[in-house]
Amino acid sequence: MKRKPFYRQLSSILSMSIGLAYFGGGLFLVASSATFGMLPSGLIRYLFGGMLVVYGGYRFYRGYIQYQNEDV
């Protein structure tokens, strides 16, 4: 089989990395009590954190599928 071009591999790896960053940011918002005076507070904080977790998981999954896909 023909190997995928480097830019395709880099794109999927970058997508997975950014997905992990979104996921971690969402977990930080949900789990941490530190607000630093600029992060949202209350229910909005948990909703935004949950959205970041879901989007980070989706973005990681999409990058993983793209990385596993053999079609160029």
Image (cartoon, rainbow, N blue to C red):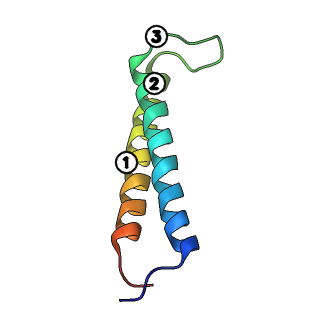
Vertical position of residue 51 compared to residue 33: above or below: below
> Taking the image as drawn, is residue 46 in sight?
no
| Quadrant assignment, res 38 | top right
The numbered dot on residue 33 is: 3
Residue behind mark 2: 28
Which percent across, then down, holds residue 44? 49, 25
Residue at horizontal 36%, vertical 80%? 70
Q: Amino acid at mark 1?
A: Gly
Give SS at disc 3.
Answer: loop
The numbered dot on residue 57 is: 1
Vertical position of residue 70 compared to residue 60: above or below: below
Sequence-wise, the earlier of marks 3 and 1 is 3
Q: Nearer the viewer, residue 31 or 67?
A: 67
Which percent across, then down, holds residue 22? 49, 40
* Separation of marks 1 and 2 at Cα, in angstroms: 15 Å
Few, some or many C-alpha atoms within 10 Å of disc 3 (few <14, some 14-19, many ≥20)? few
Which percent across, then down, holds residue 42? 47, 16
Sequence-wise, the earlier of marks 1 and 2 is 2
> Taking the image as drawn, is residue 42 in sight?
yes
Vertical position of residue 36 compared to residue 59: above or below: above
- Quarter of the image for the N terminus: give it: bottom left
- Left or right, 69 with respect to 43, comes to left
Extreme-bottom residue of the structure? 1
Q: Amino acid at mark 2?
A: Phe
Q: Nearer the viewer, residue 37 or 6?
A: 6
* Separation of marks 2 and 3 at Cα, in angstroms: 9 Å
